[in-house]
Image (cartoon, rainbow, N blue to C red):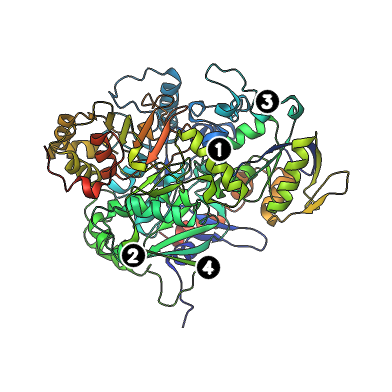
C-alpha cells in the first residue's frame, strides 16, 4: 500500500515539473491572478527582456486596490489612474483577460476568482497578493507571491518552490450562536500567534470547519497569512461542489461530474501524517476584537485590554506598550468602553453576500450612532447587484450606512477611503497594522455582525446580547 | 541582479518584532509603476512626521547610522503584505543584508530575488548585535560563501542557507533565464496534463 498522503502533498506532487538535488521543486501553476499594484514592474520586466506571457489562458487580471468606491467613472488621483491604465495596456499587449473597471465581472481579485468558478479544487493558484490564501477554501494550493515571482510565472507558468511543511489546525466541536468564521480565525491566530504558520501550509479540519459555508471557509483561509502561513486549505466536499456547479469557468455537465470524482480523491488519506497538529475547541470561541497592531493581538469582546505586566518577556512587554500607545488604549480597560468613529464592512475577508446579509440583519430597523461614519463596500460588482436585488442596500442606507461600489477600499486605503489620523475603526478586514487604514488610524478587526453592532452602539458590544435586545 | 559574496558594512539595529511590510513601505507609495526609487520611503511613517520632517526619535534618522547596510531586527521580520516594494525599499536605501531570528516566508523569498541576504540568527545572537550597534558604530563582515558573520573583536556566528538561494545570491542569477532552460520539461508537463 502507498504511504497515506495529505491533500497538500497530493496537490504538490501533481504539479512537480522537475526535481533535482540541491534545488527546490519546479512547480506548475494552474491559475495566475493579477492585479494592478503588484504587476506593472513584472510586465515591464517581460518587455525589457523580449519575453511573452507563456499561458495567457491561465492568467486572469482585474483592478481592485485603487478603485474608487463613491463612483467608478473617474479617478481623481493621477498616480492611481496611471496604475490602472498601465494594467489595461499590459493586458492588451500581452493578451491577458481583464475584468476591467467597468466590466460586470470586476471586483476584489479574491472574491471574483471563486465567483467566476476560476478557483477550483486541486489547482495551484498564485497572485501577487498575500491574501491569495483565500482560494484554499476550495481545496486549492493557493499562495501569495512577490512581483519578481509574478514575472517568473508570466514568463514560465512555473515557480521554484521549496516543499512546505504541513500543519493541521483541527477545530473540534461547533461554534456557538453569534460566533462567526471571522471570530474563529482570529481566535486561532490569537491563541497560536502571528507566526505559528511560517514555513507551513495549513489544512483546516474538524467538525466546525465542515459545517462552514464556502463564504465562511474563505474568511478562514484568507487569514492564514496572518498566522504566517502562505497557504491554508480545506478539503473539498459537497459544500464546495455545490458552490462550483454551474459557475462560468467551472467544468460543465458531464465534465463537472468527472471533475468531482477527481476532486474527491484529493482528500487527506486516513493515517496521513502532518509535520505539526494543533487543536482548538470551537465552543470556547467568543466574538473577537483586536486591541493592538497585529492580528494576533485579539481578545474576546467580553475581556479587558491587556497590560504589559501580563508578559514576563521584555520584548513582548515592549510590544504591548507600543501597541497600547499607538492604539490610544489603557491597560485593563474593558473593550466595551472603546468608542469608535468609523465602521468598514468589506475586504477580501468579509465582503461576500452572506457577510452583507448577516450584518444587515443586525442593523435592520436600527440607526448608525451619530458619531460614526459607516460604509459598506461589496466585494464585487455582482455581489453589489445581488444585494440590491434583495433590498440589503436599503437596510444599510436606512440605518445610515453609505452603500458603495466594489473594491479593496478601506482595508488598505489605497483609494480615497481613508480613516483620518487618530480615527478608530471597527473593520471587517484582515490587518490592524499601524497606519493600515490611513496614517495614524487605529483599526480593530471584527466580524461583520460585530462591526454592524458597533456601528449602532458607537462602541464595541457583544453581538450575542445586542441582537437579543428589542429594536426600539 | 548584483552578486553578493562578501559584504562589510555598518549595522542598523531596530529592536522590534513583527515589523510588517506596511511599516517597511506604507501603501501610499505602492502606486508607482517603477521598480526603483523606493528607498526614500523606507519606514516612512516611522521616519517622518505628518509634515514630512524627520522624526528625531526614530533611530534610522540618527547620524551614526548614516550609510548603514546591514539591518538587525526582531523576529518575524517582513510579515503581512506580499509587496515586493518592501525589499525594493530596503535595497534602494542601501541595505544588502538583514539579520533576524525569523522572517515571513514571502518577504524572505522576495529578498533573494533582489539580491538581499536575509540571515537567520538566534535570538541571543541578534540581541548581542543589537546591543553593540545601539551603543557604538558597529561594523560586521558577512561572508556568504563561508556562511559566517563576524566583527573584528572576536564575535562570530555561522548561519544556514539552502543551496539554491545561496547560489542565486552568489551568482546574481536571472532566475527566469535559468528556468527557461527547462522549457522542454515545462512543455512535457503541459502535454501530459492536457
Counting from the top left corner in percent of width and height, residue B113 is at 62, 43
Task: Give left or right: position of A128 versus A380.
Answer: right
Determine contact: label 1, label 3, CB under 8 Å: no
- Chain at tag 1: B
Q: Decide if residue A250 is in sight here.
A: no
Gap in angstroms between the C-alphas marked 2 and 3: 55 Å
Looking at the rendering, which quadrant does residue A240 occupy?
bottom left
Give the residue drawn at x 74%, y 36%.
B134
On residue A275, the disc is 4
Per the image, label 2 sits on a secondary structure element best described as helix
A366, above or below B153, in the image? above
Q: Is disc 1 in the same subunit as disc 4?
A: no
On residue B84, the disc is 1
Counting from the top left corner in percent of width and height, residue A292 is at 46, 41
Gap in angstroms between the C-alphas marked 4 and 3: 43 Å
Task: Give left or right: position of A246 versus A39.
Answer: left
In front of the other: label 2 or label 3? Answer: 3
Gap in angstroms between the C-alphas marked 1 and 2: 34 Å
Give the residue drawn at x 43%, y 45%.
A131
Q: Decide if residue A301 is in sight here.
A: yes
Give the residue drawn at x 56%, y 18%.
B52
Label 1 crowding class (10 Å Cα cut-off): few <14, some 14-19, many 20+? Answer: many
- Chain at tag 2: A
Label 4 crowding class (10 Å Cα cut-off): few <14, some 14-19, many 20+? Answer: few
Q: Is disc 1 in the same subunit as disc 3?
A: yes
Q: Which residue is mark 2?
A: A263
In front of the other: label 2 or label 4? Answer: 4
Per the image, label 3 sits on a secondary structure element best described as helix
Q: Which residue is mark 3?
A: B61
Q: Residue furthest bottom?
A: A1
In front of the other: label 1 or label 3? Answer: 3
Amino acid at each position: 500500500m502507498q504511504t497515506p498522503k495529505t491533500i497538500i502533498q497530493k496537490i504538490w506532487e501533481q504539479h512537480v515539473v522537475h526535481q533535482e538535488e540541491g534545488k527546490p521543486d519546479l512547480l506548475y501553476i494552474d491559475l495566475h491572478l493579477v492585479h494592478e499594484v503588484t504587476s506593472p514592474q513584472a510586465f515591464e520586466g517581460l518587455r525589457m527582456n523580449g519575453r511573452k506571457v507563456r499561458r495567457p489562458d491561465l492568467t486572469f487580471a482585474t483592478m481592485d486596490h485603487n478603485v474608487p468606491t463613491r463612483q467608478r467613472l473617474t479617478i481623481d488621483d493621477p498616480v492611481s489612474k496611471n496604475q490602472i491604465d498601465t494594467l489595461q495596456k499590459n493586458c492588451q499587449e500581452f493578451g491577458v483577460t481583464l475584468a476591467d473597471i467597468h466590466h460586470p465581472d470586476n471586483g476584489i481579485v479574491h472574491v471574483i476568482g471563486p465567483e467566476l468558478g476560476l478557483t477550483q479544487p486541486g489547482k495551484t493558484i498564485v497572485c501577487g497578493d498575500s491574501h491569495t490564501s483565500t482560494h484554499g477554501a476550495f481545496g486549492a494550493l493557493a499562495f501569495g507571491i512577490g512581483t519578481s515571482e509574478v514575472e517568473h510565472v508570466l514568463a514560465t507558468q512555473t515557480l521554484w518552490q521549496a516543499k512546505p511543511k504541513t500543519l493541521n489546525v483541527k477545530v473540534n466541536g461547533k461554534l456557538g450562536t453569534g460566533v462567526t468564521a471571522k471570530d474563529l480565525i482570529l481566535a486561532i491566530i490569537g491563541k497560536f500567534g502571528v507566526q505559528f504558520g511560517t514555513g507551513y501550509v495549513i489544512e483546516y479540519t474538524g467538525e466546525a470547519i465542515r459545517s462552514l459555508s464556502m463564504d465562511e471557509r474563505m474568511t478562514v483561509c484568507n487569514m492564514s497569512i496572518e498566522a504566517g502561513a502562505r497557504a491554508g486549505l480545506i478539503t473539498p466536499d459537497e459544500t464546495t461542489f455545490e458552490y462550483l456547479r454551474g459557475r462560468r469557468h467551472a467544468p460543465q455537465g458531464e465534465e463537472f461530474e468527472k471533475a468531482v470524482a477527481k476532486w474527491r480523491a484529493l482528500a487527506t488519506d486516513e493515517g496521513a501524517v502532518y509535520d505539526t497538529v494543533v487543536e482548538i475547541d470551537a465552543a470556547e470561541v467568543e466574538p473577537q476584537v483586536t486591541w493592538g497592531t497585529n492580528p494576533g493581538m485579539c481578545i474576546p469582546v467580553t475581556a479587558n485590554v491587556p497590560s504589559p505586566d501580563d508578559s514576563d518577556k521584555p520584548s513582548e512587554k515592549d510590544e504591548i506598550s507600543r501597541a497600547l500607545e499607538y492604539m490610544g488604549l489603557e491597560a485593563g480597560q474593558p473593550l466595551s468602553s472603546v468608542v469608535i468613529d468609523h465602521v468598514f464592512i468589506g475586504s477580501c475577508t468579509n465582503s461576500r453576500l452572506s457577510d452583507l446579509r448577516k450584518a444587515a440583519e443586525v442593523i435592520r430597523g436600527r440607526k448608525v450612532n451619530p458619531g460614526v461614519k459607516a460604509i459598506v463596500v461589496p466585494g464585487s460588482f455582482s455581489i453589489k447587484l445581488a444585494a440590491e436585488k434583495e433590498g440589503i442596500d436599503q437596510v444599510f442606507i436606512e440605518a445610515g450606512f453609505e452603500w458603495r461600489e466594489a473594491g479593496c477600499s478601506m482595508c488598505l486605503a489605497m483609494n480615497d477611503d481613508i480613516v483620518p489620523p487618530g480615527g478608530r475603526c471597527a473593520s471587517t478586514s484582515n490587518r490592524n497594522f499601524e497606519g493600515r487604514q490611513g496614517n495614524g488610524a487605529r483599526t480593530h478587526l471584527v466580524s461583520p455582525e460585530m462591526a454592524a453592532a458597533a456601528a449602532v452602539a458607537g462602541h464595541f458590544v457583544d453581538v450575542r446580547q445586542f441582537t437579543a435586545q428589542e429594536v426600539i | 541582479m548584483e552578486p553578493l559574496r562578501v559584504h562589510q558594512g555598518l549595522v542598523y539595529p531596530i529592536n522590534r518584532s513583527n515589523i510588517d511590510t506596511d511599516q517597511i513601505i506604507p501603501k501610499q507609495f505602492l502606486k508607482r509603476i517603477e521598480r526603483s526609487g523606493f528607498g526614500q520611503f523606507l519606514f516612512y511613517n516611522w521616519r517622518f512626521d505628518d509634515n514630512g520632517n524627520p522624526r528625531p526619535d526614530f533611530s534610522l534618522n540618527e547620524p551614526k547610522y548614516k550609510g548603514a547596510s546591514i539591518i538587525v531586527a526582531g523576529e518575524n521580520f517582513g510579515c503581512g503584505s506580499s509587496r515586493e516594494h518592501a525589499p525594493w525599499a530596503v535595497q534602494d536605501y542601501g541595505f544588502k543584508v538583514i539579520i533576524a531570528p525569523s522572517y515571513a516566508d514571502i518577504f524572505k523569498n522576495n529578498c533573494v530575488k533582489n539580491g538581499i541576504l536575509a540571515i537567520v540568527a538566534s535570538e541571543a545572537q541578534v540581541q548581542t548585535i543589537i546591543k553593540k550597534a545601539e551603543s557604538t558604530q558597529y561594523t560586521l563582515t558577512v561572508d556568504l560563501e563561508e556562511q559566517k558573520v563576524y566583527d573584528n573583536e572576536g564575535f562570530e556566528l555561522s548561519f544556514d542557507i539552502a543551496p539554491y538561494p545561496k547560489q542565486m545570491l552568489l551568482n546574481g542569477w536571472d532566475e527566469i533565464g535559468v528556468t527557461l532552460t527547462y522549457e522542454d520539461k515545462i512543455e512535457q508537463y503541459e502535454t501530459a496534463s492536457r
